[in-house]
Amino acid sequence: MNINQVSGAVVDAAMKVHSALGLGLLESAYEGCLVHELRQRGHLVKVQEVLPVLYHGVRIDNSAESRSAYSSTSTLFTSKTASSGW
């Protein structure tokens, strides 16, 4: 699959989830449904991978999460959040 096919599949899946659920739910509900929908379509999806952070030469685990979904060919979407609530 090329990037246009992958991004098209993500948009289509997101529209299906939104149409089924509507507005007003927490992000985690939409994320779970989107992951399910993408996996149903045969995409390899990984979510909330832990990103180690190096600070003054010390590896700090669990300091940040990358909310990502990956297909076997490309990254579909990514947003970063700090676990401290930033």
Image (tube, rainbow, N blue to C red):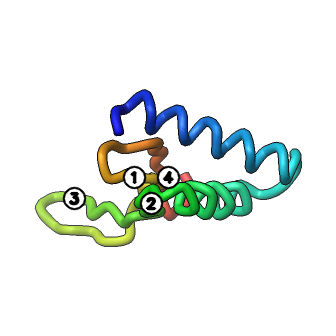
The first of marks 1 and 4 along the sequence is: 1
Quadrant where the image shows the N terminus: top left
Residue 41 figure quarter? bottom right
For the residues bearing labels 1 and 2, Cβ distance under 8 angstroms: yes
**Disc 1 or disc 4, which is closer to the eye?**
1
Residue under numbered circle 4: 81
Residue 85, picture quadrant: bottom right
Rounded to the nearest angstrom, the CA distance separating label 1 from label 4 is: 17 Å
Q: Secondary structure at mark 2?
A: loop
For disc 4, the neighbor class at 10 Å (few under 14, some 14 to 19, many from 20) is few
Q: Nearer the viewer, mark 2 or mark 3?
A: 2
Question: What is the distance, in whole Å, between disc 3 and disc 1 at their CAs?
Answer: 27 Å
Q: Are marks 1 and 4 in contact (CB under 8 Å)?
A: no
First reached walking from the N terminus: tag 2 or tag 3 = 2
Q: How many marks?
A: 4
Q: What label sits on residue 45 in the rendered view?
A: 2
Which residue occupies 83% across, 44% down?
19
Residue 27 vs residue 86, the one in the foreground: 27
Identify the element where label 1 is drawn.
Answer: strand
Of residues 13 and 48, the one nearer the viewer is: 13
Q: Amino acid at mark 2?
A: Val
Residue 17 in the image: above or below residue 44: above
- Counting from the top left corner in percent of width and height, residue 12 is at 64, 38
Residue that label 3 marks: 55
Give the distance between the C-alpha atoms of the residues marked 2 and 3, in whole angstroms. Answer: 29 Å
Considering only vertical position in the picture, is 51 above or below 62? above
- Residue 70's disc number: 1
Quick check: marks 2 and 3 in contact, CB under 8 Å? no
Look at the numbered disc 4 and give the secondary structure of its residue: strand
N-terminal-most mark, 4 or 3: 3
